[in-house]
Amino acid sequence: MRILQNTETRNSWVAWARSKQVYGKDGFQKCLAASAGMVVMLIALGLPSPIAAQNPQPPGAGENVLQLAQPAEPGQTSPHITITLQDALDRAQKNDAQYSSAVTEAKMAREDHVQARAAGLPSVAMQTSALLTQGNGAIPSGRYVTNDGVHVYRQWAVVHQDFSLGTLTMLGSRRGAALESLARAKAEIAQRGLKVTVTKDYYALIVSQRRYATAQEGLKQSERFLAMTKDQERQGEAAHSDVIKAQIQVNQQRTVLQDVQLQMENDRLTLAVLLFPTLTENFSVVDDLDQGQSLPPFSDAREMAARENPDLRAAMEAVQESSLGVSAARYAMLPTITTDLDYGIEANAFALRSRVSADPAKGPLPNLGYFATITLNLPVWDWGTLRSKLRQAEYHRQQARKELTWAQRQSMNELYSFYNEAQTAKSTVETLRETASLASEELRLTTLRYQAGQATALEVVDAQSTLSQARNAYDDGQSRFRLALAQLQTLTGSF
């Protein structure tokens, strides 16, 4: 029997035993039925029952609560994570489906290159066969004249090789290498595009957090100004209209704070989708906007773009692959030679020496030997199929060349555009920083002038709004410069 350690549970059992002793069996049943009826009546009236009062539910237990990430174990939460921009890039590369698809294509192209290279080399295979022919009761060869006995066994080692202009020049391997390089270039394009996306979302969250802090500070300033106007109104030094204007400013700042908080949460969710396999908000990002990042001279950026631009590399590899495709289509019109060298046995017994069923009088003869098959394949008539494939390959090469010239022009256009954007954003940051500093000083001086009776409430409110706008503009300018650098690095690589 289990020992009852809970005092409340033990007391309830004692009360139950005493009720049986006092009321008897029938009286206890009536008491139990009356209690059950009372509970049902309380539930029907919407009142809390004694059972529910003894076992209260936790707050929000009956509400629909959105849970973004479930903890690993009950009562435990996932650890808080602090993420830098590089951490964000590494996590995004592991979780982004589009980038993973590009990397997988590059891996598959690598295996295609291995297979194409092996296709031009000799192949070796082992074959074991038993040809069992139905006999006819008259001659040893049985019912099939192609066999020299009713039992024929084969054990061959076969060496196969195709000789053509394509195999002699390793055209398949070269084409596979071009396709592999093309796939790697596309994977790098996807990686740099992902970097731009992550950089944009990462600094969008940082800017939202800064905007939230600015909105909090703006609300505090508005509340202080409201308290100031009320105090001056009581002293007869300010009109009631100043109090109304200050109250309007407080209400507006509260609305701004709510909107900024909503935007901050949305930006956090957007970044979380990129970084984590399961959606979670238990992370924070490192604010490194104030850490200056240099912009290289344009001549250096142009040299890096000429070497490291994956778009140009992909276009050039596409031209190389299309040219090899034209060569393959032309080589298909030429004769090819196929050779097979077989070494082993084909005898009436699975042995190195045996009697031949067609002529047993010769005694045991050696079975191990070789034979070679050399075949010349000469295309004669195919209803224009090979010619059509050649024209297709030429059309593909023409298009690849046009895309290469377009990629070269587009690359120069993007280089100038991205560099000018980064240079402009860098110079704008300095101006916006100075503007934010001046706006802060203007608010301080305007507040002092208002306290001295030399400024109006409208001037103070305008100075508060100007400061908030200047700080937000400065944060946007810093984020713009970081995004411009990420876009420039899609052409030049990291610098």
Image (tube, grey):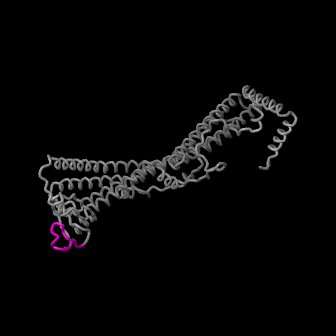
Q: What residue appears at the point 31 percent right and 49 percent down from the top-left corner? A: 407
- As drawn, 370 above or below 311: below
Asked which quadrant contains residue 243, the reply is: top right
Q: Position of residue 54 (x, y in %)?
A: 77, 38
Q: Position of residue 363 (x, y in %)?
A: 18, 74
- As drawn, 7 above or below 350: above
Q: Is residue 179 visible?
A: yes
- In the shown orientation, is residue 213 left or right of residue 339? right
Tell me which segment is drawn in magenta: 352-366
Asked which quadrant contains residue 332, the reply is: bottom left
Q: Position of residue 207 (x, y in %)?
A: 55, 45
Q: Is 77 or 201 nearer to us in this picture?
A: 77
Q: Position of residue 335 (x, y in %)?
A: 14, 58
Q: What residue appears at the point 20 percent right and 69 percent down from the top-left corner? A: 370
Q: Is 114 or 94 nearer to us in this picture?
A: 114
Q: Is 18 or 140 nearer to us in this picture?
A: 140
Q: What residue appears at the point 26 percent right and 59 percent down from the top-left corner? A: 172
Residue at the extreme right of the image, as rendered:
22
